Image: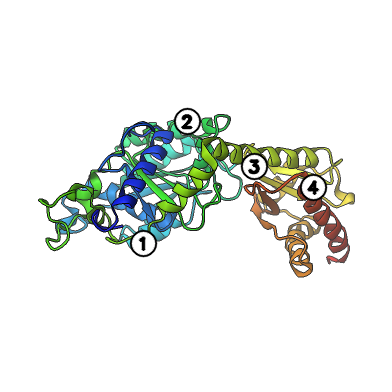
Amino acid sequence: MSLFEIAPVFHLLESALLAKLAHLAGFPSPGPDESPPNLPPGMFCPGGSVALLYSLQLARHRLQPDLVRFGASGQPLSVFVSKSGHYGAGKAAAMLGIGTDAVVEVATAHDGSMDPNALRDAMATAVAEGRTPLAVIATAGTTVTCAFDPLNEVADACVEHGAWFHIDGCYGASALFSTDHRHRLAGSHRADSMVWNLHKMMGVTQQCTALLLREPERLDSCFSSGAEYLFQPDKQFGEWDSGDRTYQCGRRVDALKLWLTWKARGDDGFAARIDHAVAMADFARMVIGTSDGAFVPVVDTGFTNVVFLWVPPELRPLDLEYLFSEWSEGRSGAVWDRLHRLAPRIKARMQAEGTALIGYQPIHGVNTFRVLFMNPAVGPDDVDAVLGHIARYGAEEWADLD
């Protein structure tokens, strides 16, 4: 993927796919039955972190049009992302010379979604300190709880400050395939850019990352070098060349994997994959809710991630509000300390015996399990088996904890 004359079919294929994805997100693009545009609404990138790097550079170029010729102006900038957002924001800021101190972590609600009032306060504080709000990174499907930031309210804040609005939809953007769940991304059409990892929920072979842009013409002004030996303006089909709109020039044809998968499964198959994942998560939530206190949900966003604790019999029923207040106020006693250390031991037992592999992470100060559903082969028996393993190992390990 660099020159149209080298890979004409793949350029047409990528353009058609990007247009269809952009259409689902509400970006300006041809409809699904129209011809693909010779200026696609974005590009395929090697992963979400690189896509974010592109987006922040585009944001800075919009703010400072002379950036390409004269370099960064030294103007203090701020980039805003929720405390639940991806760590790639700091890496991108470091690589672009913006600085990690410019990344402002915005407070979240209990479920991990960005608090829009906290965002407005953070942006106002940055302005008062002489910093320019460069961009806001909203998350559609956070890594741990799968929370969706309120995109319309984030968009309003961006408009107020002239900031670039980027959506990290690496995981959750695939909800757009489902008529039952696309409402979670209400407001996506207002973004300047959005990244979408099809190698996550859609099961496409890693890597397959689409970066969608509202104004794809900005890629030319930001990245074009006009190398005459490649990108001659008067050659046939030169307007289709993608290499001068990227930093990479030549790229892998990652779009082909999505094209073949989409052709095989169709729109209905993609929607069914999302709906099945949520249905299995709902089944897990039902089992947890009817476990007589053996399991308790910690955060519930209603999508594909189920975050919960296994509770030893002597602590049932567990008062989560009290638990979290104890941790936040630094008064956790020996019981809560044991509970915090329990999840790592359960996971280690599962790994050692080869029964399951499940992640845990601290939520509001206590280690909790996170079961994430995306595999279409997973069924109710798998859910019962995994929860059964956790309960068995939990009982055994709790007895041995000091």
Number of numbered tags placed on the structure image: 4
Q: Nearer the viewer, mark 3 or mark 2?
A: 3
In the picture, measured across the screen, residue 292 lies left or right of residue 172, that is right
Q: Which residue is mark 3?
A: 277
SS at badge 4: helix
Height in image: 387 above or below 269? below
Q: Residue 12: x and y, percent?
A: 31, 46
Observer-nearest residue: 213 or 261?
261
In the picture, measured across the screen, residue 245 lies left or right of residue 295, that is left
Q: CA distance from mark 2 to mark 1?
A: 31 Å
Q: Which residue is mark 2?
A: 186
Q: CA distance from mark 4 to mark 1?
A: 46 Å
Q: Are marks 1 and 3 in contact (CB under 8 Å)?
A: no
Q: Residue 331 shows which numbered tag?
A: none
Q: CA distance from mark 3 to mark 2?
A: 20 Å
The part of the image, by quadrant, that contains residue 277 is top right
The kind of residue tagged 4 is Asp
Q: Nearer the viewer, mark 2 or mark 1?
A: 2
Return the disc, 4 or 2, that comes first in the chain's sequence. 2
Q: Which residue is mark 4?
A: 381
Return the disc, 3 or 2, that comes first in the chain's sequence. 2
Q: Nearer the viewer, mark 1 or mark 3?
A: 3
Q: CA distance from mark 4 to mark 2?
A: 34 Å
Q: Residue 370: x and y, percent?
A: 67, 51
SS at badge 2: loop
In the picture, measured across the screen, residue 272 lies left or right of residue 23, that is right
The part of the image, by quadrant, that contains residue 49 is bottom left
Q: Which residue is mark 1?
A: 94
> How busy is the neighbourhood of tag 3: few (under 14 within 10 Å), some, or many (20 plus)?
many
